[in-house]
Image (cartoon, rainbow, N blue to C red):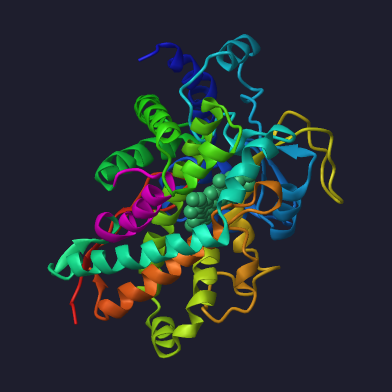
Amino acid sequence: MDARYSIRWAAEHGLPRLGFLALRAQGDLLARLMSGDEGYDDPYSLIDQLRGDGGVQVTRAGYAVFGYETCREILRDRRFGVRKPIDSAVPLPLRRYAERIAVPPNPIEAPSMFALDPPEHGRLRKPVASAFTPRAVARLGDRVREVTAELLDAMAAHESVDLIATFAAQVPIAVIAEIMGFPAADRELFLRWGSHVAPLLDVGISWQAHHRAMLATEALTDYLVAHIEKVRRDPGEDIFSLLVTTGDLTTTELLASANVLMGAGFETTMNLLGNSIPILLSHPDQLDLLRAEPERWSLAIEELLRFDTSVQMTARSVLEPVQFEGGVPLEPGKSVVVSVAGANRDPAKFPDPHRFDVTRANAKDHLSFGTGMHACIGASLTRLEVLQALPALFDRFPDIRLDGEPTRRRLSTLRGYSQMPVRLKSR
Ligand code: HEM
């Protein structure tokens, strides 16, 4: 393990972590949201206190925005970019040194499209976006149907299961394996990789969490480089093979895109499926409505995405001086936390926002898939996955119920459960 990763950790996470700890002790709301149990367990009450007038809030922990309109505006505004400079509060020599240290390829590091601004962003995004043709997505849909049926059959042999391990993780794993052309036998690898890399999206993670993420990304890089070579020799019918054989992406760029597809496509959907189940179980009237009128499921899925999104926030850096009407001037070089969860629960956009309502007419306006040039490439695939998996689960196990408290993951950007004991009663 490269000791220099520790310097990256110190600059990117260690010093911000100390700052968050100090601010949290003083009650700072943004620090409480971004790090610590309160933000993981109940972000929405902190978000309500932070929203203010909906514009950019200037806090001691940084800029942040929780109002729907301003979140949307920032995600669509070219004066904001995605390159994340190390925080300017970190002493300059450490910052300069840390910025030169290369870490193994991962979803949040350039040339990942997540971390690129134009014009480089388009070069990486275009081939991936065009590989997700309606035909390719429909084929994945067929696979989801098969996998869901197999999983439900296997679950029916048990009275109780952990729904995350047996179901919520398995559906997206099968889809990723299909997109990437990975053998299904390697699925444990994706599970471990996903759980070790997900904390990198947060700020101020512990040295141990960073260390685990670096080791996992090193191992995954070896796996993916071997996979890219294999695909070059013997391409399959999958989306990734199309990307390798028809684009002009270098191996480094292909590696970055593979990382993005795995990072964006697996954890997010697993968490969305997991988050949806307790919500539906605790709203039996809504579930009854869906059972009586199954055509309502597609709007219900938008409401689930709005109500408890698995990607709670993203961030942008200020590229040039910006001042929104009635707001303060934003300083170039600083980051802005864009709270997708805050936008989705903004009462100015969604009346009575804390009410889960599968008939909410404008639920689809949520920002859970982002908007603008980085808008989610997998949105239609996700809708299709969830639209097949959730109704099939409730149909097959009409008496399903929680069997104890599900365990929340200790993350602030990605929101989900690590375990969810349920009792099933098969028909
Ligand atoms: C519940 C499921 C999902 C959620 C909530 C979600 C959410 C998001 C969000 C919020 C962004 C924008 C990030 C930003 O602006 O900073 C994004 C981008 C992206 N998503 Fe998703 N996503 C999901 C599923 C998927 C799936 C299944 C795939 C593909 C297999 C995928 C691929 C991507 C890619 C490639 C981008 C990057 C686009 C770019 O930077 O230009 N996502 N996603």
Image location of residue 150, percent across then percent down: 24, 65
Residue at point 69%, 32% (across, down): 120
The secondary structure making up most of the magenta span is helix
Residue at point 40%, 81% (across, down): 287
**Which quadrant of the structure image shows residue 119?**
top right
Q: Is residue 46 above or below residue 388?
A: above
Residue 309 seen in the current view: no
Q: Nearer the viewer, residue 400 or 26?
A: 400
Q: Nearer the viewer, residue 207 or 106?
A: 106
Image location of residue 136, percent across then percent down: 50, 57
Q: Nearer the viewer, residue 195 or 356?
A: 195
Residue at point 56%, 30% (across, down): 253
Image location of residue 144, percent across then percent down: 37, 63
Residue at point 40%, 11% (across, down): 3
Image location of residue 322, percent across then percent down: 83, 39
Q: Is residue 144 above or below residue 130?
A: below
Q: Nearer the viewer, residue 106 or 138?
A: 138
Which stretch did the figure color magenta? 165-183
Q: Is residue 391 above or below residue 119?
A: below
Q: Quadrant of the N terminus?
A: top left
Q: Is residue 381 magenta?
A: no
Q: Quadrant of the C terminus?
A: bottom left
**Which quadrant of the structure image shows residue 117?**
top right
Left or right: residue 107 compared with residue 181: right
Residue 362 seen in the current view: yes
